[in-house]
Amino acid sequence: MNTVPALFHQEGGPHAVLLLHGLSSSPLEMRYLAKFLRAQGFSVSVPVLNGYSAGTPERPMHDWVDAAVLEYDRLAQSHAHVSVCGLSIGAALALALAHRRPNLRALVLLSLTLSYDGWAVPWYRFLLHLAYYTPLRRAWRYRESEPYGLRNEALRAKVRRAMERGELSEAGPATLSLTALREARRLADSVRAHLTSIKNDCLIVHAIDDETSHPRNAQYVAGRLGSGFLRTIWLDDSYHIITSDNEREVVAQSTASFLRASEAIGRGDDPAGLVVSKALARRLRHLSSLVGASRQA
């Protein structure tokens, strides 16, 4: 079995980034991004949250938010800025945290998931919340299957082997309980009710071919947030686990650049030119055009 620390934390600069992994998963999902941000001078923290992370007893979603708030408050005591970055359901958790702590510096929402509605989600997934109220609640688990959130075939094969052995991997858990899925649904419902009140700087990064969370999740949130500084980046060579897949470097660089731009805004400076390089800007414009074409197809 992979050994996951109870808390991955490395000090860097005065700007700390709280990284929230996906549902019932582990800090392994955020490992590459955490290392990149630390190398860029940020302090990073990737906690195991009681009741939410793999290896902890399942708890109601309000306890997930409480655990995330506790980690945020701990960082805020010793850092000038604290930003929050979440992956998948972790992005929904980041939004819930922003509602509770509106003074956080910036939000980064990766593969944001309010609804499991991607192209690889089985047709019966929408019925699972009903199954929670049957005897299946204690025994049945939803089993992850190909492509495991990864377009990269070599990494997908590695993850497949880990899941077959029941180990944690960069792509999350092999199975999800009905209880966890129900609580994720409740979290999403709660987040939807508060979107317009969230005004923090926000970066949204989503793959146009996300097999778990359709791009409309990102579009829905982007259209309702009250953020004054909001950027959306579309990826065209990744699936759901964008922190590990083919474009993880783009995700990491874009995150670091955006956080610096948010700092500049906080100082009253002009953030123009700080978010992306010219080469990356050309690539992002190209990806945006692909998304537009996919909507019209």
Image: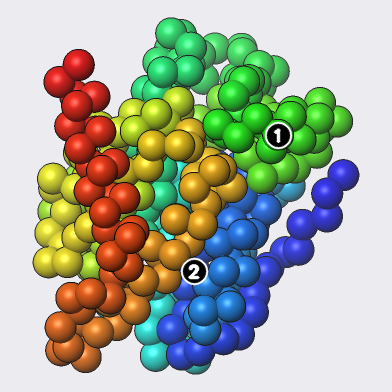
- Closer to the camera, 151 or 278? 278
Q: Is residue 193 above or below residue 267?
A: above
Label 1: which secondary element: helix
Query: Residue at 56% of width from left, 43% of height from top?
Result: 245
Left or right for 287, reference 45:
left
Query: Residue at 43% of width from left, 84% of height from top?
Result: 15
Q: Is residue 128 visible?
A: yes
| Residue where numbered disc 1 is placed | 154
- Closer to the camera, 165 or 72? 165
- Closer to the camera, 9 or 239? 239
Quarter of the rendering containing residue 129: top left
**Amino acid type, label 1:** Ala
Q: Position of residue 25 (x, y in %)?
A: 63, 45
Q: Position of residue 67 (x, y in %)?
A: 52, 62
**Amino acid type, label 2:** Leu
Quarter of the rendering containing residue 229: bottom left
Q: Is residue 196 above or below residue 294?
A: below
| Residue where numbered disc 2 is placed | 18
Task: Please tell me which of labels 1 and 2 falls first in the chain.
Answer: 2
Binning the other alpha carbons within 10 Å of mark 1 as few (below 14), some (14 to 19) or many (20 upward) gives few
Quarter of the rendering containing residue 268: bottom left
The answer to whether mark 1 and mark 2 are in CB contact below 8 A is no
Q: Is residue 115 visible?
A: no
Distance between the Cα atoms at labels 1 and 2?
29 Å
Query: Residue at 45% of width from left, 26% of height from top?
Result: 211
Binning the other alpha carbons within 10 Å of mark 2 as few (below 14), some (14 to 19) or many (20 upward) gives many
Instruction: Give residue 105's mark.
Output: none
Q: Position of residue 34 (x, y in %)?
A: 58, 66
Mark in front: 1 vs 2: 1
Q: Quadrant of the C terminus?
A: top left
